[in-house]
Image (cartoon, rainbow, N blue to C red):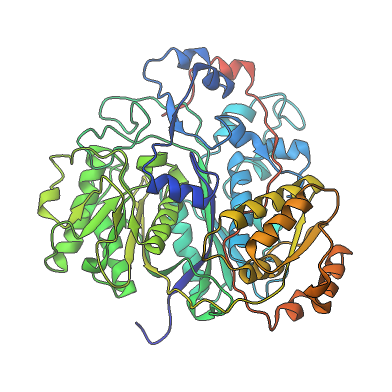
Amino acid sequence: MSEYDDRVAVVGLAGRFPGADSVPEFWRLLRDGVDAVHDYTEAELRQLGIGPGLLDDPALVRSGGVLPGGALDGIAGFDAELFGFDARDAALLDPQHRLFLESAWAALEDAGCDPRRHDGDVGVFTGISTNRYFLFHLLGNPAASGGGPDDWEAQLATRPGADYLPAQVAYRLGLRGPAMAVQTACSSSLTAVCVAAQSLLDYGCDLAVAGGASVSLPRHRHTPEGLVSPDGRCRAFDAAAAGTGYGTGAAAVVLKRYADVDPDRDRVHAVLRGWAVNNDGAHRAGFAAPGADGQAAVVAEALARAEVSPQELGYLEAHGSATVLGDAIELAALHQVWRAAGASPPGSCALGTAKANIGNLDAASGIAGLVAAVRAVGEGSVPAHVQFREPHPELGFETGPFTVPRTLRPWPHGGSRLAGVSSFGLGGSNAHVVLEQAARPAPAPAAGWQLLPLSAHSPAALFEACRRLAGHLETGGPGLRLADVAYTLAAGRRVLPHRAAIAAREPAEAAAALRQAAAGPQAGPPLPGEAGPELHAAADSWLRGEDTDWTSYLKDRPGRVCTLPAYPFRRRRHWIDPPAHRAADRGGPA
């Protein structure tokens, strides 16, 4: 490594994906080889505002990645009160903003960070897609107009733009570092991660939230040899590849300088060893065409910055456009990088893409791929490419080191696990990140009584938080330590007005007490006398609504950040249907 530590730790993960409401669910979906692309019913298409002209078009793609909860409910629901929105403002807010606000909140929870108590500046870096909700539902709609039927300039000033998402996150969550919108088309969210990582190394902030969101409404049309798949599936590198299929999703990571990681308190999901961003320039067939030289250069630069040879990578999360031209250029660029570094054994690097499971999340596709790769290096498993049957004969797999797994596989190499993640934007903006598995810390010794403080914005959310945590403790497995749960809840959660506290010595005992607290309306069962005066004093302070001094309480107690269920957002429908004349249109461009 270089003389200073230029690595960046991934300390928090969160997201919502087609078929998965959390990162653990997303990993299970990938691991189990689930095709989460949804085939819309006629009723769902009408509910989403697709008019008869487009419904009658045989070229309409009637499939896409849909969030759990339903084609509409998955994007219309939002916990407006928690984030300080009234009902009207929530209904006018871009659903992409809503999804990313939730993901940012949950990612900071996963990092064990309450920004209000964090000693340092937290930055936010985001990339999102076109605001189709504004274009198809709000623009020209009397139900959405604030001052009059033609008064849209005021709406444009603060509502629909990608520019305002990072500022919304900074305002709603209280983040004081840089708040930057990063827009590079399909590579936006991975580029945002690269910009965030560099900001950390430049001391522009001390912690960074980065990622993106995309809401895709089913208005795409398939044309032969065009961009869009006829059935919404992404069959990247396969002989049957016929274009990309789009989906809805959002994800965020929390990054920290590796040199600042506290080995006794922080949990590190993976380490960013290197990253790079570039553009193909003019050396390609056209503006919308990718460039092999540019893609090869960005991968090579990220590897060089990471001081890693291509042969050390066991897995590459590909961009995987699933167009014949895009796949051919991506694989040619990878072959160029690997050959320049010397001979590689056939099959030594697995190649895959989360797009095969969930569709192309457009501006959020890069962050989805990064989350998949983080889990892969952490688990030591390479997920199957669920849509892969036969390699495309024109791609030349037989001449290089790449193999596309059809089933879940163990990591191809021994030693430290390394992976690459690519994301390429239409227009030629490329990003690549090199990941390494994190060192596993030695478990701390078990410690007696633990206090578990919980809080929420409403009594209903508090009871649901108790139920979710109880379920997590009941199924957490042998690696779960109650001291870690207690530390994470006390040090890393936003302090909210409705509170509960329980005391226990082991997970099963804690789960039983949480089930009792979830029954309400009490704040939890009485704390056992043998739990000790210090624990009783902290619990009493917490339940009285005081600013409990958790720093002093936790000072000599073991525990590090661990993954727990995220805040139970109380989502209510905030949605404006499209105007009647828009529903009769033939829809937007593919």
Left or right of 310? Residue 188 is right
Whether residue 536 appears in this view of the structure is: yes
Whether residue 104 appears in this view of the structure is: no
Front-lying residue, 347 or 362: 347
Left or right of 193? Residue 447 is right
Figure quadrant of the N terminus? bottom left
Q: Position of residue 505 (x, y in %)?
A: 68, 69
Q: Kindly identify the residue that appears in the image at 68 percent across and 57 percent down.
A: 511
Quarter of the figure with residue 161: top right
Count the numbered circles shown. 0
Q: Position of residue 160 (x, y in %)?
A: 62, 41
Residue furthest toward the right? 544
Front-lying residue, 97 or 547: 547
Q: Position of residue 532 (x, y in %)?
A: 80, 77
Figure quadrant of the C terminus? top left
Quarter of the figure with residue 433: bottom left
User: Is the residue 461 above or below the residue 191 in the image?
Assistant: above
Front-lying residue, 179 or 432: 432
Q: Position of residue 92 (x, y in %)?
A: 69, 36
User: Is the residue 148 above or below the residue 100 in the image?
Assistant: above
Q: Kindly identify the residue that appears in the image at 80 percent across and 74 percent down.
A: 530
Front-lying residue, 532 or 41: 532
Left or right of 436? Residue 217 is right
Q: Kindly identify the residue that appears in the image at 47 percent across and 66 percent down.
A: 269
User: Is the residue 232 above or below the residue 422 in the image?
Assistant: above
